[in-house]
């Protein structure tokens, strides 16, 4: 989450995100929510392969000039490294590409994403736009935006059986 959310309630952080305060788009200053790093490392220790899906997009204008360059896209990796997140590939959308297309290409066993409360809810979620024949192969786990993953199961086999409350 954006660092201006530190010490705020989840509802306050959602509101900040909706209002697009200056720190909301300062991706380099993002901080983990709760014990996310430890939770992910625990899953990696059990054999999980972690992939990260970035909000940043590699865009080019009509002339093909880069608007967001490779250096900007490395922000995510720098933030993950800074906070000790487990190693994993970071995926960015290309021009004209959707999050769902990335999910379809990767077809993860489990896709954990937030409920997109601040930007319109379920219709904005990745899993919603994944084609049904592929969606059936992916365990979708939806968490509250800015709620963190601390309450998700510690055991990978339990995560595969997880049902939202």
Image (cartoon, rainbow, N blue to C red):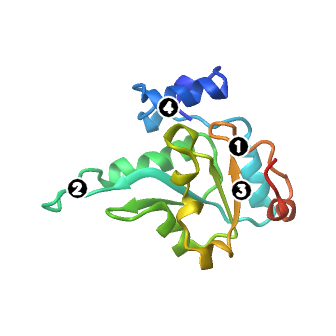
- Picture quarter containing residue 15? top right
Query: Tag 2's secondary structure?
Result: loop
Viewer-nearest of discs 4 and 1: 4
Q: How far apart are marks 3 and 2 (CA)?
A: 34 Å
| Left or right side of 142 for 130 | left
How many residues crowd mark 4 within 10 Å: few (<14), some (14–19), many (20+)? Answer: many
Residue 117 x %, y %:
58, 40
Mark 1 touches mark 3? (CB < 8 Å): no
- 1 or 2: tag closer to the N-terminus: 1
Q: In this view, does 61 lie above or below 34?
A: below
- Identify the residue at image location x=68%, y=74%: 136
Residue 20 x %, y %:
42, 30
How many residues crowd mark 2 within 10 Å: few (<14), some (14–19), many (20+)? Answer: few
On the image, numbered disc 3 is attached to which residue?
Answer: 141
On the image, numbered disc 2 is attached to which residue?
Answer: 66
Q: Is residue 140 above or below residue 5?
A: below
- Identify the residue at image location x=65%, y=20%: 7
């Amino acid at each position: 989450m954006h660092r201006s959310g530190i010490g705020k309630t989840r509802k306050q952080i959602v509101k900040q995100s909706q209002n697009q305060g200056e720190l909301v788009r300062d991706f380099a200053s993002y901080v983990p929510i709760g014990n996310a790093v430890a939770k992910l490392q625990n899953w990696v220790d059990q054999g999980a392969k972690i992939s990260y899906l970035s909000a940043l997009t590699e865009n080019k204008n009509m002339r093909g000039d880069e608007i967001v360059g490779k250096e900007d896209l490395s922000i995510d990796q720098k933030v993950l490294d800074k906070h000790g997140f487990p190693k994993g590939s970071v995926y960015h959308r290309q021009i004209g590409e959707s999050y769902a297309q990335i999910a379809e290409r990767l077809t993860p066993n489990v896709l954990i994403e937030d409920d997109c409360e601040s930007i319109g809810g379920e219709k904005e979620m990745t899993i919603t736009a994944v084609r049904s024949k592929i969606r059936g192969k992916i365990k979708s786990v939806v968490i509250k935006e800015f709620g963190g993953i601390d309450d998700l199961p510690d055991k990978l086999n339990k995560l595969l059986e997880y049902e939202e409350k």
